[in-house]
Image (cartoon, rainbow, N blue to C red):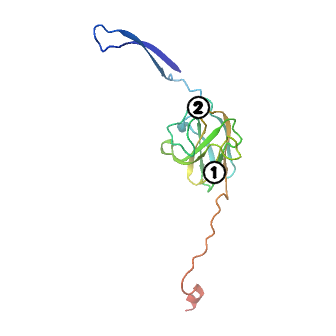
Amino acid sequence: TFWYTNEYYDNNGGSPNRTKLWQTRIGSFVLPGCKSTGPSNDLCTDAIDIGTLTGPPLVVDGTTVNATIDSEFENCGTSITSTGIWYTFESNLSCISASTCNTANYDSKISIYSGDNCGELICVTGNDDFPGCGLTSFTGPFDGSMMRYYVLVHGLDDSKGDFTLVISDSSGCAPKKKTKAPKVKGRNLREQKQS
């Protein structure tokens, strides 16, 4: 909702021969009880909880149309230049990914943060255009063991539209190093028992 008003103002410092001129002010406000027409998860504090990643992918459809720009948040993997919406989920898996790859009808971006709430978010990763995904995004694989994550799905410049977000287990993406038993100097255990 926008409003404007015209009012007189003094243009010469209060002298007796002052001339009154018009001034126009433009501003915006929301009436109490009125709700935004944007998505319900437009703000980080209203992030939709899509569950806990335990194996099967978490899948959700969304739109950034009529959302706002989240410029107060740190750029994470990619700059925040267009409208976006928020999701949150939990995971303790070792390796996960987030994707709008070939499921968005606009130039999408994804930024992933970890933290217990919107005031304590730490950047994990992000992506604009991933190879093989055209103008859509894929982030990962990344460490999924930090428990609570916040996902901002946004776009390039003023690009906005519809998407399907997929959060997946990427097990095996970071092969574990084989560890050898440490060598012990001196006699082996059998020799020690016999002596």
Measure how far apart labels 2 and 1 are at the Cα level. 25 Å
- Name the residue type under label 2: Ala
In x, y percent, where is residue 24? 45, 15
First-in-chain label (2 vs 1): 2
Label 2 packing within 10 angstroms: few (<14), some (14-19), many (20+): many
Viewer-proximal residue, 133 or 93?
A: 133
Q: Is residue 189 left or right of residue 6?
A: right
In x, y percent, where is residue 19? 35, 9
The image shows residue 6, relative to residue 104, as above or below, that is above
Picture quarter containing residue 192?
bottom right
Label 1 packing within 10 angstroms: few (<14), some (14-19), many (20+): many
Picture quarter containing residue 145?
bottom right
In x, y percent, where is residue 155? 61, 37
Disc 2 marks which residue?
67
Picture residue at 50% right of the left edge, 18% below the top: 3
Picture residue at 63% right of the left edge, 64% below the top: 176
Say which quadrant the C terminus sits in: bottom right
Viewer-proximal residue, 152 or 134?
A: 134
Disc 1 marks which residue?
140
- Name the residue type under label 1: Gly
- In the picture as drawn, the residue positioned furthest to the left comes out as 16
Between marks 2 and 1 in the image, the one whose residue lies nearer the viewer: 1
